Image (tube, grey):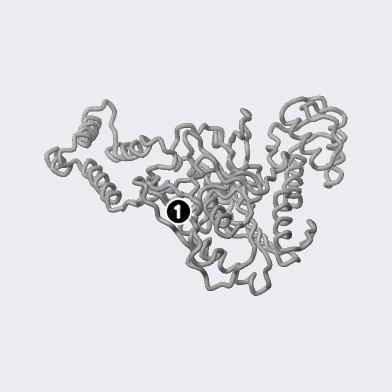
Amino acid sequence: MVIIIAGSVVISSVLSFLADGLSGGTLSALLFGNRSFGKLYSVYRTLLSDYLYPVDSNTLVEGALKGMAQSTNDPYTVYMPPSQAASFHEGLSDQYEGIGAQVEQVGEAIVLTPMKGSPAEKAGMRPGDQLISVDGKTVAGQPVDEIVSKIKGPAGTKVTVGVRRDDNPQIIQLTITREAIPLQSVITKRYSDQTVLVQITQFGEDTGDKLKQQLQTLNKQGLSGLVLDMRGNPGGYLSTVQEIGDLLLPKGAVLYRLVDRDGHEQVARSNGSTIPFHVPIVVLMDGNTASAAEILAAALHDSAQAPLVGTHSFGKGIAQTEETFGDGSSLKYTQLKWLTPKGVWIQGKGLQPDYPVAAPSWASLPPLQKLPLQPNTTGDDVATAQKMLRALGMSVDRTDGYFDASTQQAVATFQQRHGLAPTGSIDTQTAMALQDALTQKAKEEDPQLAKARQVLAGILGQSYAQGAA
């Protein structure tokens, strides 16, 4: 740890001196004869004094810093200028104005994760969507902080983001109205059998405190078991995992193992809690359950025998440390790999569920794009609309993208049931009604949650009725 901190200080000092234009002799004395840094200084001075076009010294320094981080070929090791660093921390704070999505660079891709109930999610964004454009302009090659600044904006204004989903080459255009985003990292729902659903959407600075408050209230009301839903949770602070582990696991239980570059292992254990919380837990996860969320899921599975339900998790088995500098910029770099309590490294593999349950295919249908859709037309949007109608119980003869008579009748029936003019064509209002109906269906018909509640009921020795609320 001392070596890492010292290294950061030396690099920071060198680049500060470069920016201040100190003499080569003074710099050489500082670098103790390091030829690589001498070459760095030489390139800096040459570009500053001889390059055809004027260039700002700070721009050169910032480029050098970004380049050092990028040279690791690690998508999680990033130098963040002040604005990007602020956006990174803002994403784990209480509130901001925007669309409600986490923006992360993974390799060359810009990956989005919408927050539950956010404008982004309501507009049809799904976890794992790859960002292609903002307001019609490509984001290729742009720094994350610049991209985030384009997406954010005052509440009430609109932004259109183009995304690519899975392996589909089609670009989906989502027009989203920005809002003030209160970050609800802990959401609870109580059932009549005294079991509780707890959704943890991210591991922010105050997530541990919020969960503690919720558990105190739930304990007073009576609590027999808990379903912990971490689907779509991209992770967050490791310190928050410790706080939640203290709440959910008995004192001394292993939470995770950290291994440094030299192979030295550090074991993190629960410190226990003053809250008398000892009830069965079932964990819900999916392919977008990542990082800190995977650490907690593995801890509960290995140290508290909590069953895992859903699909395999993302598979991020490394941890980053952030070094913050005086101007607000920071270096986020991979420092450790983490292992499950049983010593398994899940990098690139993820956690495997004890009870595999896939989400229904209709849950990931993209929003309709090219409107209106009318009889005797064809296209991907027509095929998507047909799948939506069929998922909502409408009778449709085909889903191949041809708008036939059965599709027209299904649309008219749907419109009648939702108080719309039964034209049989899909306009913007009908498309929004279809999307809202699917969102409601997803809340009411969640096979993964149903299975998790069934597993919990089995542990408790209770009968399970899906409609209980």
Q: Quadrant of residue 384?
A: top right
Residue nearer the viewer, 128 or 85: 128
Q: Could you tell me which quadrant the C terminus lies in? A: bottom right
In which quarter of the view is residue 80 placed?
top left
How many discs mark residues in the rendered view? 1
**Percent x, y for residue 86?**
43, 51
Q: Measuring 57% from the left and 51% from the top, which residue is drawn there?
A: 155
Q: Residue at x 40, y 49 (%)?
A: 259
Residue occupying the point 65% across, 74% down: 220
Is residue 239 shown above or below 348? below
Is any atom of residue 242 visible in this view? yes
Q: Which quadrant of the structure image shows residue 225?
A: bottom right
Lateral position of residue 148 relative to residue 404, left or right: left
* Secondary structure found at label 1: strand
Residue 193, relative to residue 146: is it above or below?
Answer: below
Above or below, comparing residue 376 to residue 303 in the picture: above
- Give x and y (percent) for residue 361: 72, 39
Pinpoint residue 2: horizontal percent, then vertical percent: 28, 53
Whether residue 180 is visible to the viewer of this picture, yes or no, is: no
Q: Residue furthest front?
A: 342
Q: Amino acid at mark 1?
A: Arg
Q: Which residue is mark 1?
A: 257
- Which is more toward the observer, 402 or 39? 39
From this viewpoint, which residue is outermost toward the left?
Answer: 25
**Residue 1 relative to residue 50: left or right:** right
